[in-house]
Image (cartoon, helix red, strand yellow):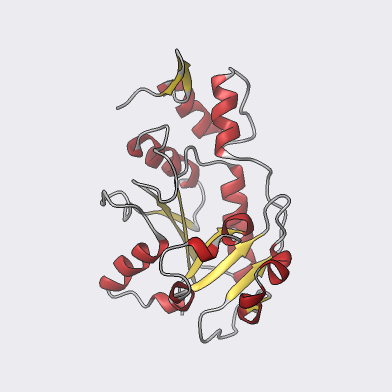
Amino acid sequence: MMRIGLFGGTFDPIHVGHLDVVDAARQALSLDRVVILPANVPPHRSSPHASAVHRFAMAALAVRARPNLVLSDLEMLSDQPSYTATTLERLASRGTDTRGLFFITGADAFREIATWRDYPALLDRCHFVVVSRPQHPAAALRDALPALSGRMIEPPAAHDELGAPRVILVDAPTAAVSSTDIRQRVADDASIAGLVPDDVAAYIEKHGLYRIEGDRMFSTDI
């Protein structure tokens, strides 16, 4: 059976930290494919700075040279917040057995899992792959979330059957980059070389994304 990962986000913009998380999860679990799911309306956040069209286009540029990554517009088609629970419901309604999917997230985000919609039932709907982020090692979640420690395991071998959904902790280095920092660097006219894929940097420059006009950060639309 193929191992499929899911990685959702606002991607405002997508950056090398995002790609490091995906690569770490894919390698640790021998995932055959990771589906990138940009959110039209992200949950728990203020409105994105770039339009959904721009954010989707940047994600497309970031994944096009990576054969194991595919881009999905599943969350682009809805004007409702892209909660993980809702995404899994949409996939299930299309006939997908979500219990065999691997939802990828950073350890910093997973620390707040109790605030996610449909917690704790959400944890029974798919595997969660939690990857270390700077200052947030995945292994520390055993102490930070003791009620879930019994679900947490190290990455299994490629041929191992996992059975019931688990929380899989992946300790791997990932770049200390955030979308917030990138937007601020663009607004400050500082270089973002090496923080985003080159094609994404060129796209940001071409469309004038994340520049400051008066007191407001803005971007041109297409």
Answer whether residue 202 is visible to the viewer in this image: yes
Give how far across and how far down residue 129 sits, in percent: 57, 67
- Between 29 and 118, the one nearer to me in the picture: 118
Vertical placement of residue 51 versus 43, above or below: above
Rendering coords of residue 183 (x, y %): 54, 29
User: Which image quarter: residue 169?
Assistant: bottom right
29 sits left or right of 206 in the view: right
- Between 62 and 55, the one nearer to me in the picture: 55
Residue at (51, 85) in percent of width and height: 164
Numbered circles on residues, count: 0
Which of the two residues, 79 or 30, is positioned nearer the viewer here?
79
Q: Is residue 11 left or right of residue 135?
A: left
- Residue 200 x/y as whole percent: 50, 34
Foreground of the two, 181 or 172: 181
Residue 140 x %, y %? 73, 65
Q: Is residue 197 visible?
A: no
Viewport quadrant of the C terminus: top left
Q: Is residue 72 left or right of residue 193?
A: left
The residue lying at 61 percent from left, 28 percent from top is 192
The residue under the point 33% across, 37% down is 53
Question: Residue at left 62%, top 72%?
Answer: 168
Q: Is residue 62 left or right of residue 173?
A: left
